[in-house]
Amino acid sequence: MIKILHTSDWHIGRTFHKYQTLDEAKQVLNSVVDIVKQQSVNVVVISGDIFDTSSPKEEAFEVLKNAFNEILSAGAQIVAISGNHDSAQRLGFAGAFSSQSGLHLITDVERVGVPVEITNGPVTVDFYGIPFIQPELWRHLSWMPHDASTQNVAIKAAMSQITESIEKRQSAYRKSVILSHTFIAGGEKETDESERAITKDPTVGGVDSVPAATFKGADYVALGHIHSQMISKEFTKARYSGALMYFSFKEVGKRRGGWIVEFSEAGEPKIDWVEFLVPRNIIELTGKFEDILINPKYDQYKDYYIQAVYTDDKRVIEPMRQLKEKFPFTANVIWLPENVAERSQDSHRKQLENKTDLQIIETFAKEVRNGEELSKDESAIVEPIMNEINSGGN
């Protein structure tokens, strides 16, 4: 039997609305090590975006190194591919040496048809990695179309190599797992600003995605890039595990974890979900500012990352400072007035035509303050300042 833990999108080194997340990443990865031990996992899969940037800081490398060492020490091997955030060169430089210790870093697109073979008892699993492919850079390969420009075309070309290899290597109790960092059809609907688009389809101007059926023939497809848990309706063996942690408030309520995939001599794999530790949860609070600030029902969220959406008709002064007194981890504040003042349909030029400087400021204030005009006290402050500026400060 071979038991696999499918993870993806670790994004080590990423910040969450300016909050550093390295300590949280350590905690989550420690929980992954615990799962490896408790579940007797043989292989941990990482389907791309191990780092958040192609030039990670030393501290991020240290977190990754420690996580890899702990997983390997727990008795599991690691199979990982590079994603669109990673530097394939940086991740792959030690691949030839690290594979001897059970760390298999797949970053070379040219070798997509060459699997990492792992055997336990009578069962063998061939792991095929499709690192993130930027099609324009790989048109020189004999199997890549000379005009390839989309993920759809590039992944189909890579799968032609993998399918050929799977057919040649068929034997009793041999299974195949494919790692790929891309959108599958339907997956693009789950994306948000935290998952930066891989590329655009020039034919329709939308997100470039790959039909899940492209991967048929594999016994399991470990996908990365979507930050949410997702199972393809078209091919249920193709799944996203989602991100290691929360990286966007659009991920509120979405589970953090990975897929446990168990291969035995029997035909179909057994697939279960396992939850990861969430060091700091996230929540969006919507309502009147004063209610968010004083209502005791929100006390339970004091240790959460908070996005506050207040609906007051008037803008609140220093809302972030006030909220942080109750919610120390307030990360974002949005003003979304419940009643929106009617705005002039005239052009900006027309609105300012024949107006004094003070009138221009009054127009601007009314526009950005949801119809609220300057008070008499505010005008009394602004008017002499404008007069002084117009007189040259004399």
Image: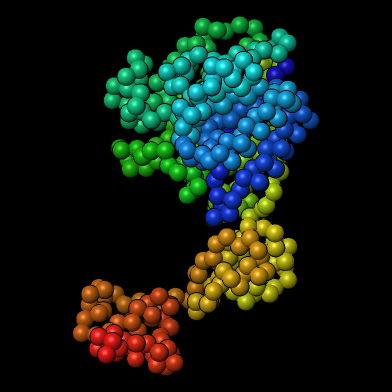
Of 247 and 387, nearer the camera is 387
Residue at point 43%, 78% (across, down): 369
In the rendered structure, the answer to whether residue 215 lies left or right of residue 8 reads left
* Point 70% across, 19% down: residue: 2
Please count the marks in the image: 0
Q: Position of residue 282 (x, y in %)?
A: 63, 55
The location of residue 42, given as percent across then percent down, is 70, 22
Q: Residue at x 54, y 65 (%)?
A: 333
Vertical relation: 257 (above or below) 323: above
Residue extending farthest to the right is 38
Question: Please, which residue is most extreme toward the left here?
Answer: 354
Identify the image's colour scheme: rainbow, by chain, secondary structure or one colour: rainbow
Q: Quadrant of the C terminus?
A: bottom left
Along the horizontal axis of the image, is 388 left or right of 340? left
Where is residue 163 drawn, in percent x and y? 48, 15
Q: Quadrant of the N terminus?
A: top right
Task: Please name the residue shown 68% across and 37% down the image.
Answer: 29
Query: Taking the image as drawn, is residue 287 in sight?
Result: no
- Along the viewing direction, whichever of 4 and 24 lies nearer the viewer: 24
Q: Position of residue 185 (x, y in %)?
A: 46, 35
**Relative to 147, 112 lies left or right:** right
